[in-house]
Image (spheres, rainbow, N blue to C red):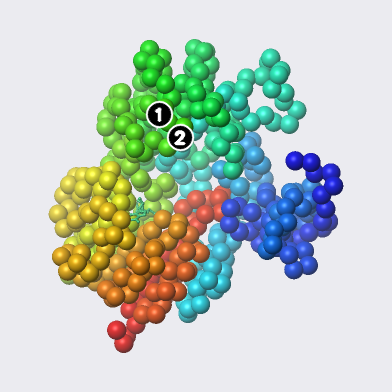
Amino acid sequence: MRHKNLPIIEKLEITDAGTEGMAVGRFRDIVIFVPWVVPGDIVDVQILRKKKKFWEARLLRIIKESENRKKPWCSHFGICGGCRWQNMDYSTQLFYKSKWVKDSLLRLGKFKFPEPLPIIGSPQTISYRNKMEFTFSNRRFLNEGENANDPEIKLQALGLHLPGRYDRVLDLKYCYHQPESSNKIRLAVKNFALEHGLNFQDLVSHQGFLRNLIIRNNQEGDYMVIMVFGEYQPESIHLVMDFLKETFAEIKSLYYIINTKANDSFSELEPILYAGQEVIYEQIENLKFRIGPLSFFQTNTSQAKRLYQIARDDAGLQGHETVYDLYTGTGTIACFLAQNCQKVIGIEQVEKAIDDARMNAIINGIENVEFIEGDVLQIFDQDFIEKNGSPDVIITDPPRSGMHPQVVKRILDILPSRIVYISCNPATQARDVSWLSEKFHVEKVQPIDMFPHTSHVENVMLLDRNDQY
Ligand SMILES: C[S@@+](CC[C@H](N)C(=O)[O-])C[C@H]1O[C@@H](n2cnc3c(N)ncnc32)[C@H](O)[C@@H]1O
């Protein structure tokens, strides 16, 4: 993009930090989004795009640094989209995450709610992820001054997509999101592939042998590695897989997947176990959970434990209740709560997640849970309630888009005495709770940080049925 003639705003004060990791300043009454800056900074920016309700700008120079700034420790900061808030002190990050929750409730909610409780920060702020997906590319993102025609330059990359760029991958030297072994495995695979002349995929034509590398780990330090190949080349597959098997004792489960489709999603493909165990296990309190190559599991395990404990405390179970766990995933919350109530019914639309949920119940000897596969919208109706029993408590943890209005309407008809609403999107949660506020009131708002150095925030709301119902 040519920037020469675009307007410049000088000495803009950055006053807020919001979604997508963008910081915010105001010029007259216009909101300006600026990436990579921190509330409290005074900056010169150049306006790149003017939209009706806001402008988008790029940073030209920092005139005065905010007190909330912290020196980013990752060499990829400023390019990689992984940790956009790494230049912000962690307590400031938490402040803006809480603010986002409260602002969403005020702006979109239009119902009464108590002051949100202090946000629960993550005790681990680096290496907190238990899963990362990396992409191979034959044309990496080039830094300023690098020339693709320079014969000295290696163009192959194994790393993360640049924000919003399906065709550009940043070659990662080190990533602080996962423990050391993840870095060792990723770098070793890349070097091995280069030494053996293996072909990295072309992200535009989707041709090429090496496509993705998925690394999962548990708190015990066991690793599961999944290689995704774009072509079936048995000899080369054995070469790579044997290398991984023989080099890393911590890889307890080793899979590969052949993906010849145009996109990188592999959830419907068959993972092939090459060596080791079928699954690794994660322990939360007294429960063990299976993690297979396609299983969903909360990405920050120690905060997942806190989240489930909050859900259990909020549910206030005495032992006699029927609980519904809507959008149950692999049934972790359902299993967690089953120990404190009469029965739990979990509903989830992904077949493989339901298989995992049933296995999780079996391996933990939990007999009072039932998992039902299907779309909550389709199956959670009056007939279903008559068959499975009326819920005293509903736990709901929908995807970012929130609940379908019809699902909210059914909850209003069914009228459980409590609802524990877990959400990774305060905006859709505020919308849904405003509908539910017809018959429920908000007892508690508890934000929790699952993803340090990103703008994401999780929020748990406890709703109690109003007295007249
Ligand atoms: C945020 S995750 C919940 C995860 C789970 N509570 C946990 O902590 O592991 C949302 C889940 O909802 C499922 N889902 C999304 N839309 C759905 C629908 N319409 N009906 C049933 N499940 C759905 C997704 O597959 C995903 O597993």
The disc, 1 or 2, on the residue closer to the chain's N-terminal end is: 1
Q: Residue at x 58, y 57 (%)?
A: 19
447 is higher (above) or lower (below) than 215: below
Q: Residue at x 29, y 60 (%)?
A: 378
**Mark 2 — residue?**
264
Q: Are marks 1 and 2 in contact (CB under 8 Å)?
A: yes
Mark 2 crowd level (few <14, some 14–19, many ≥20, 10 Å Cα): some
Q: Nearer the viewer, residue 28 or 103?
A: 28
Image quarter hosting the N terminus: top right
| In this rendering, position of residue 399 left or right of residue 207 | left
**Tag 2: amino acid:** Asp
Q: Is residue 445 left or right of residue 315?
A: right
- For label 1, the SS is loop
How many other residues sit within 10 Å of disc 1, few (<14), some (14-19) or many (≥20)? many
Query: Residue 260 occupies which quadrant of the picture?
Result: top left
Give the spatial CA distance, label 1 vs label 2.
8 Å
Residue 227 in picture, x, y percent from top left: 40, 27
Query: From where the camera sits, is residue 409 visible?
Result: yes
In the rendered picture of this protein, how many numbered marks are placed on residues? 2
Res 120 seen here: no
